[in-house]
């Protein structure tokens, strides 16, 4: 044992003892890494541990672990274990609390923190052994571990994960332990602790777990009450989301296409989504949770008990800190208002749940549920989820919650997280609004169920607009089940428009609001849908934001340009309204400056104007001719030099290696300009003009070589059998066949063809055969 740091004459005194302690720690760490020599604290004598403990500031943790080891052997009844853990627990929880509050820095500077010592002397492995012991013993009489012992084990494991680097990853690598943890969720008393530890572990796990591997998943989920199901959604979020979803737009299409070729099978996230949808009643319960009112939530006493458990637990400690602060403020307020100073007032306020806390509790639950529903709506089973969500009346339910919960007015003491402010994107209120808007966007996008966002009167209004314009009603409007639409004076879409128009200029919601409304318009262009929104002043609001408030945010500008494009496309009334609002040259110049400041952001609007101009020019209507002659925007785009300028810049700002989901629209807009030119037999003229513009720039071939490569990529990308081409058709009203033909003509290898790009590149500058691969 002397080799393990035993006393020796050389060091002497306190310095020698410290060196001996460090020697023990070094040997333990080496043993755990190599599997040889000292691997756990139980191998060291009690006498030696006692001798080194005080100087090393181990706070008795190694000795307590040795006692725990001796009292947790296979035949023990674990009766002594809990009292030992009760001694260990405060030492670790104080440290963990420091990590999640302002004292984090001081805690990290500690030489041998308690959690580090606990892990180093084998505490983490020992607790995992204790928890899993009943599942590993084959005897008929299984060992029974008390709920309190399980809670203590989980709490200590979580605190150690917070403070000691590498512990969470080590636990994540033990798949048997991760799946075992799910079985502990059947017990209501240990649910919260288990859920929090699982969430932490899954957050660092390299490989996503497969939900179908969880024993009896369907019965586990069906055993949850509504509060547990909402908390379970926090865990599900990690298992059903693709790992790179957050930066989807930033990944190049080359990289994504290459990845898709490698992964022909559904991803684990997609398999997990399917697994959830196969659980009977799962989506229905989520819809009920998402739409229940605050008054329908569980009784006060249950929630206060749950809060107490969470407060000793450390997940969401800052949220609870905020919750408890509001509760105390309201309790103090009601006690000062009370004339009774005998203390009875304090007693009553402690047992009553403040309304603000009830609301925040519900907001935090709905956040998780809406996120899961949103991911499912964007998955492979989208149509199945759509059908269920409509049937379970999610949209009317959210409409009823809109004013009182989702877009409620902030009180003077609105609840925010510790260290944040009311307008911070991290606050639950803000996050709920964004999640709600993302759900609306996913729900409306290219789906006929979007009309469920209206109420019956508003659907009648759409029919009346079609009748007045002497155009057929949209089939989806006629076929909408009126029993599933919104009720009340206004539908969800109209409510959204109202808050959108009141949103402050610097608000972070503007982007999401515009995206949600735009998704309602996307798909085949509907005159009635456009007029419904135009009558509510949407066009004027967007123009005010772009021109009068001179919006600077690139994201918000892009969302406004996209929305404006969908709102105005082929709609002569919209262009007339535009001209009425943009009624001076100064205003029009500001508008053009905004468009030209970033074509990646504004190209969808450029596409809309180009397509609309082409259609209007082919109509003989007097009203159309009048607007064509008066509208500044249409007159501007009718100039050949302007169209050529846009085409030149659109091709120049993108390259195959830098194409993403966000900027590929620039390629499609340039193609739209050339398809319309081809219809008028002007394709050779456009190509020749591009060639002249290259020479003017003194860089022959640089635009046309690049365009040739881009179109080759376009074929590879869009002619894939899995690609849905209806979006291109719907957005342009040009058949996909015509798209394909135009690209083929432009890529023709025949140098004598007047419509082939190759005919306009001098051989000395030709660079079209280079392979494009992801670099």
Image: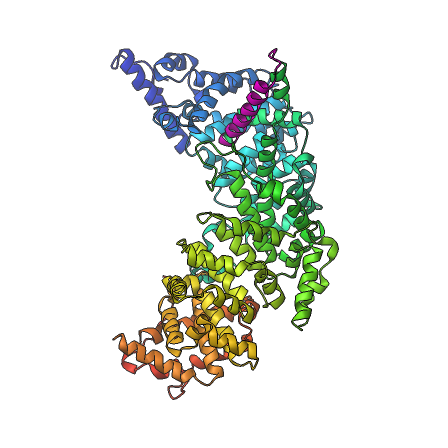
Q: For this rendering, which residue is in front, 461 or 432?
A: 461
Q: Give the quadrant of residue 180.
A: top right
Q: Give the quadrant of residue 102.
A: top left
Q: Quadrant of the C terminus?
A: bottom left
Q: Give the quadrant of residue 71.
A: top right
- Is 493 positioned to the left or the right of 512 in the image? right
Please state the total of marks drawn on the protein image: 0
Task: Give how far across and how far down residue 7 sits, in percent.
Answer: 32, 13
Q: For this rendering, which residue is in front, 381 or 574?
A: 574
Magenta segment boundaries in residue numbering: 318-343
Q: For this rendering, which residue is in front, 485 or 194?
A: 485
Task: Give how far across and how far down residue 559 sits, in percent.
Answer: 48, 57
Please say whether residue 165 is one of the residues in the magenta stretch.
no
Q: Residue at x 39, y 65 (%)?
A: 592
- Is 502 positioned to the left or the right of 107 in the image? right
Task: Give how far across and how far down residue 596 sits, in percent.
Answer: 37, 65
Task: Give how far across and how far down residue 610 sits, in percent.
Answer: 47, 73
Q: Residue at x 49, y 82 (%)?
A: 679
Q: Residue at x 31, y 15 (%)?
A: 17
Q: Is residue 375 visible?
A: no
Q: Is residue 169 visible?
A: yes
Please say whether residue 329 is one of the residues in the magenta stretch.
yes
Q: Is residue 609 above or below residue 539?
A: below
Q: Is residue 316 above or below residue 596?
A: above
In the rendered image, the residue lying farthest to the right is 483
């Amino acid at each position: 044992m002397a080799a393990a740091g035993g006393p020796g004459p050389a060091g002497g005194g306190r310095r020698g003892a410290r060196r001996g302690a460090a020697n023990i720690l070094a040997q333990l760490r080496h043993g755990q890494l190599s599997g040889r020599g000292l691997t756990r604290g139980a191998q060291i004598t009690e006498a030696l541990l006692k001798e080194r403990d005080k100087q090393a500031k181990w706070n008795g943790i190694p000795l307590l672990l040795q006692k725990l080891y001796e009292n947790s052997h296979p035949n023990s009844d674990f009766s002594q274990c809990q009292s030992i853990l009760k001694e260990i627990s405060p030492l670790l929880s104080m440290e963990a609390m420091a990590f999640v509050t302002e004292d984090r820095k001081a805690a990290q500077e500690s030489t041998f923190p308690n959690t580090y010592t606990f892990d180093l002397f084998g505490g983490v492995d020992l607790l995992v052994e204790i928890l899993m012991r009943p599942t590993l013993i084959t005897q008929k009489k299984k060992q029974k571990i008390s709920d309190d012992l399980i809670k203590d084990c989980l709490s200590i494991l979580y605190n150690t994960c917070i403070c000691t680097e590498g512990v969470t990853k080590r636990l994540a690598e033990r798949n048997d332990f991760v799946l075992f943890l799910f079985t502990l969720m059947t017990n209501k008393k240990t649910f919260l602790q288990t859920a929090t530890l699982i969430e932490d572990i899954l957050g660092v796990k390299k490989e996503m777990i497969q939900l179908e591997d969880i024993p009896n998943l369907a019965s586990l989920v069906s055993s949850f009450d509504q509060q547990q199901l909402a908390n379970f959604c926090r865990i599900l979020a990690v298992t059903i989301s693709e790992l790179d979803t957050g930066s989807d737009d930033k990944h190049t299409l080359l990289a994504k296409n290459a990845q898709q070729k490698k992964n022909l099978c559904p991803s684990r996230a997609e398999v997990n989504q399917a697994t959830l949808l196969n659980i009977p009643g799962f989506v229905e319960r989520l819809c009920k949770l998402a739409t229940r009112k605050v008054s329908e939530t569980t009784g006060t006493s249950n929630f206060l008990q749950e809060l107490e458990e969470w407060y000793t637990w450390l997940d969401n400690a800052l949220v609870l800190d905020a919750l408890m602060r509001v509760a105390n403020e309201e309790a103090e307020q009601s006690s000062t208002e009370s004339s009774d100073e005998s203390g009875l007032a304090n007693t009553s306020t402690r047992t009553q749940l403040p309304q603000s806390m009830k609301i925040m509790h519900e907001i935090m639950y709905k956040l998780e549920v809406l996120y899961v529903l949103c991911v499912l709506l964007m998955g492979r089973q989208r149509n199945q989820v759509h059908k269920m969500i409509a049937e379970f009346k999610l949209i009317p339910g959210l409409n009823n919650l809109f004013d009182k919960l989702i877009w409620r007015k902030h009180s003077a003491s609105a609840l925010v997280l510790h260290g944040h402010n009311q307008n911070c994107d991290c606050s639950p209120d803000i996050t709920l609004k964004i999640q709600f808007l993302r759900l609306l966007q996913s729900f409306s996008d290219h789906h006929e169920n979007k009309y469920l966002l209206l109420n019956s009167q508003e659907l009648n209004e759409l029919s009346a607009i079609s009748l007045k314009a002497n155009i057929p009603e949209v089939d989806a409007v006629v076929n909408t089940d009126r029993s599933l639409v919104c009720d009340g004076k206004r539908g969800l879409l109209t409510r959204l428009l109202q808050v959108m128009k009141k949103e402050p200029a610097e608000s972070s919601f503007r982007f999401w609001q515009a995206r949600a409304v735009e998704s309602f318009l996307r798909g085949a262009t509907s005159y009635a849908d456009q007029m419904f929104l135009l009558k509510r002043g949407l066009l004027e609001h967007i123009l005010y934001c772009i021109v009068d408030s001179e919006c600077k945010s690139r994201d918000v500008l892009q969302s406004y340009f996209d929305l404006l494009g969908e709102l105005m496309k082929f709609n002569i009334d919209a262009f007339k309204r535009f001209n009425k609002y943009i009624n001076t040259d100064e205003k029009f110049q500001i508008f053009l400056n905004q468009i030209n400041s970033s074509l990646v952001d504004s190209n969808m609007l450029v596409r809309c104007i180009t397509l609309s101009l082409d259609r209007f020019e082919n109509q003989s209507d007097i009203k159309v001719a009048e607007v064509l002659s008066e509208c500044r925007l249409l007159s501007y785009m009718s100039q050949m030099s302007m169209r050529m300028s846009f085409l030149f810049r659109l091709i120049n700002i993108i390259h195959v290696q830098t194409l993403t989901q966000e900027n590929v629209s620039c390629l499609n807009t340039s193609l739209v300009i050339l398809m319309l030119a081809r219809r008028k037999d002007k394709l050779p003229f456009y190509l020749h003009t591009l060639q002249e513009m290259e020479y003017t720039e003194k860089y022959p071939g640089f635009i046309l070589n690049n365009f040739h490569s881009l179109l080759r990529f376009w074929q590879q990308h869009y002619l894939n059998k899995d690609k849905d081409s209806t979006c291109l058709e719907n957005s342009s009203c040009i058949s996909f066949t015509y798209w394909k033909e135009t690209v083929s003509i432009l890529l023709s290898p025949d140098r004598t063809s007047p419509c082939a790009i190759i005919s306009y590149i001098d051989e000395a500058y030709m660079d079209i055969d280079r392979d494009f691969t992801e670099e």
